[in-house]
Image: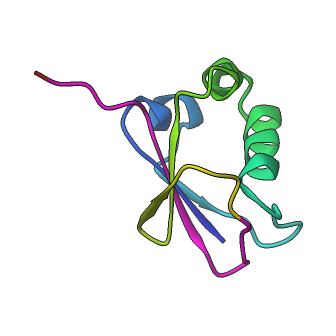
Amino acid sequence: MKIKYFAWIKDITNKDHEEINKNYPKNIEDLKKILSSHYPALEKHINKNILRFAVNMEYVSTNKNLNSSDEIAIFPPVSGG
C-alpha cells in the first residue's frame, strides 16, 4: 500500500510518500489511527476532519475499505480565490 502526502502534510511527515508492507489498514478510519500514532502533529488535523483522501486517484468521502494494492493520497483542504 502506498501513501502519498501533499502540501504541508509533507512537512509534518517529512516525506512525500511511504509504503505500508504489513498490517495494512482495513479502511480509511484505520489509516487515520495509524497516521495519528506515527505523526502526532497530524492528529489534530485528522481529528478536525479537514484532510481529504483519494484512493486510487478517486476522492472518497466515506470510510472506504482498503486493499494492500491501493494508493492513497492525502491532501489538505483546498482554498483559493
Where is residue 21 drawn, in percent x and y?
77, 72
Tell me how the rendering is colored: rainbow
73 drawn magenta: yes
Image-quadrant location for residue 80: top left
6 w.r.t. 67: above or below: above
3 w.r.t. 30: above or below: below
55 drawn magenta: no
In the rendered structure, which segment of residues is drawn in magenta?
65-80
Viewer-side residue, 63 vs 35: 63
Q: Residue at x 25, y 25 (%)?
A: 79
Where is residue 31 drawn, in percent x and y?
75, 50
Q: Main secondary structure of the magenta part?
A: loop
Where is residue 62 drawn, in percent x and y?
63, 51
Where is residue 78 drawn, in percent x and y?
31, 32
31 w.r.t. 71: above or below: above
78 w.r.t. 53: above or below: above
Q: Residue at x 55, y 29 (%)?
A: 12
Q: Is residue 17 left or right of residue 6?
A: right
Q: Residue at x 60, y 59 (%)?
A: 18
